[in-house]
């Protein structure tokens, strides 16, 4: 019954106080959905909060993190990062909320994402999501529609 409710209302689960206790498999299942009614930056913030909640050492301020702390979060989030549609995140949010965590990315993936924000050309590799989440149109879709 609870799982059915979560399947029908995943946004409620992601915004709950117990969010950090969600099992990894359930969170992955939610993030693979195309019908989430959350902005992509909010999804990013959810996975960061969840990841930090998986290891007590990561609960301190990010300015105090060591290279080892970033590596811990990198391992925790490696299955989640490809599920984020970075091309749907505003550049100001990228700067403020993603760049501080650049050390949790695979270097090639970060380079690809950073290239998009510098050049506005989105050419994702197979490691990253390509399509929009239901409610948002990607730049490619907007171009196809306008043509």
Image (cartoon, helix red, strand yellow):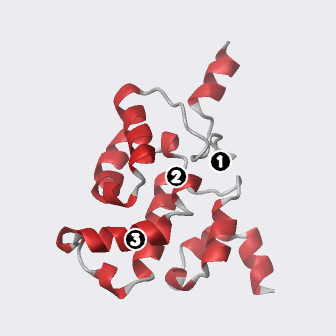
- At x 47%, y 26%, the residue is 121
Residue behind mark 3: 73
Task: Check if mark 2's residue and mark 1's residue have beta carbons within 8 Å.
Answer: yes
- Residue 41 versus residue 62 in the image, above or below: above
Precedes in sequence: disc 2 or disc 1:
2
Distance (Cα) linking label 2 and label 1: 9 Å
Mark 2 highlights which residue?
40
Under circle 2, the secondary element is: helix
Vertical placement of 55 versus 49: above or below?
A: below
Identify the secondary structure beneath mark 3: helix
* Labels 3 and 1: the sequence-earlier one: 3
- Other residues around mark 1 within 10 Å, as few (<14) / some (14–19) / many (≥20): many
Which element type, helix, strand or loop, lies under badge 1?
loop
3 on left or right of 24: right
In front of the other: 100 or 19: 100
Of residues 80 and 15, the one nearer the viewer is 80
* Residue 138 seen: yes
Question: Viewer-nearest of labels 3 and 2?
Answer: 3
| Residue shown at 53% from the left, 73% from the top | 15
Q: Residue at x 65, y 47 (%)?
A: 133
Q: Say which quadrant the C terminus sits in.
A: top right
Q: CA distance from mark 3 to mark 2?
A: 19 Å
Tag in front: 3 or 1:
3
C-alpha separation, residue under disc 3 versus residue under disc 1: 25 Å
Q: Position of residue 124 (x, y in %)?
A: 55, 37
Task: Decide which of 80, 137 is in the foreground and name it.
Answer: 80
Which class describes the residues within 10 Å of circle 3: few (<14), some (14-19), or many (20+)?
many
Check residue 133 in the rendering and tell me which mark sits there, or answer none: 1
Dividing the image into 4 quarters, which one contains the N terminus?
bottom right
């Amino acid at each position: 019954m609870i799982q059915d409710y979560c399947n029908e209302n995943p946004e409620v689960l992601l915004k709950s106080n117990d969010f950090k206790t969600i099992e990894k498999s359930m969170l992955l299942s939610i993030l693979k959905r195309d019908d989430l009614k959350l902005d992509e930056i909010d999804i990013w913030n959810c996975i960061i909060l969840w990841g930090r909640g998986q290891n007590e050492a990561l609960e301190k301020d990010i300015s105090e993190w060591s290279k080892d702390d970033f590596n811990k979060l990198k391992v925790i989030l490696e299955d989640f990062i490809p599920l984020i549609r970075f091309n749907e995140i505003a550049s100001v949010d990228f700067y403020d909320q993603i760049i501080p965590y650049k050390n949790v990315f695979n270097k090639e993936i970060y380079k690809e994402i950073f290239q998009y924000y510098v050049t506005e050309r989105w050419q994702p590799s197979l490691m990253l999501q390509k399509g929009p989440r239901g409610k948002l149109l990607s730049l490619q879709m907007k171009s196809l529609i306008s043509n």
